[in-house]
Amino acid sequence: MTAEAMTPPAGAARASSSRTPSRRRTHATHRPTSWWLDKLRYRASTMDEEYLDLSEPISFASEVERDAAIRFFNAAYRAEESGLRQAHELADEMAALDPELAEALKLYGDEEGWHRELLTEFIDYLGGEIRPMGTVTGTFYRLYGRARRMETIMLTNLMFETIGSTTYRMTLRHAKHPAVRQMLTILTRDEAFHVPLNVHFIREVLRRKPDVSRRRMKAIYSLLFLALVASTIASRRRAQAFDNLSVAELSRAYAEQLAGLFNHESDLDMKPPWIIRRIFGMDDEALSAITNKVAVSVAAAEASVDRRQVDVTAL
């Protein structure tokens, strides 16, 4: 499904799309902040051209399924809310040091905020409300909210964006209702740009702060990797009636997507935890195959700049 611009029908909520920008095809891994900023400005200028169509009534097989759907999109809402807050706080921190990077962070946060607005309206459409976070989700975001080092915040955000995109794409396997599919598509489509953007943010931190502990970053990556894979157990109690994903398939997908993030980013030198590799049978050949499924390059980001041109497929 491709999220395309459309004339808003009755009951539609605003989303965004894009004109086709002028782009140069490249497979380069690195680009300067000015390149990312140019793309973010373009995306911001077209954020009012697409609509989420909520005109068709939605029904569920049971109240259990409805509740699971509301919980599912509440988790998405909390992820966007957290990304918005942290990105804007970092933008304020970077304003004097690097105005371009600060603006890029601000615009990235604005996109997260736009997602939050869409999710607020969509959850209401489902017959639900924004709920307090559960124990597991709340623990994750309380710890995330306490992070103060920019490298920790961006690495955590990158990993959250990755598992979010993974969950949305897998849920598309079973989603039938047009509004549900479009909401999942919008979220997935924009993560295709946000994941490599966060890799750029991490590189910028390491370039500007050579005293950053690489060992500490590796430890955070490993610990969060294990925690996110394990979190699939708790999430199934709340959302499985909606997304129809088992612990086994979701945990493997998380492990594969997180393992592939840095496999071709040798300068960042981050490897998946050995215990994960052992549990899921990730030898070097398997890791190489996994990497082809994970798009963190500038080429992938460039292909997703124009929201209207992105074709989102189920994972």
Image: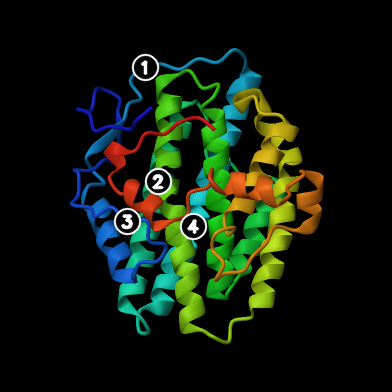
Q: Mark 3 points at which residue?
A: 26
Dot 2 or dot 1, earlier in sequence: 1
Q: First in sequence, mark 3 or 2: give its number.
A: 3
Measured as percent of width and height from the top left, residue 163 is found at: 59, 46
| Image label count | 4
Q: Considering only order in the chain, which callout, 4 or 1, is on the residue closer to the N terminus?
A: 1
- At label 4, the amino acid type is Gly
Please tell me whether mark 1 or mark 3 is closer to you in this view: 3
- Which residue corresponds to the image point at 48% horizontal and 33% vertical from the top-left? 123
According to the picture, the residue beneath numbered tag 2 turns out to be 190
Mark 2 or mark 4, which is nearer the start of the sequence?
4
Q: In this view, does 42 lie to the left or right of 265?
A: left
Q: Residue type at mark 1: give it.
A: Glu
The mark nearer the N terminus, 4 or 3, is: 3
Residue on which disc 1 sits? 56
Residue that numbered label 4 is attached to: 83
How far across and how far down the image is residue 240, in percent? 67, 28
Asked if marks 4 and 2 touch (Cβ < 8 Å), the reply is: no
Labels 1 and 3: the sequence-earlier one: 3
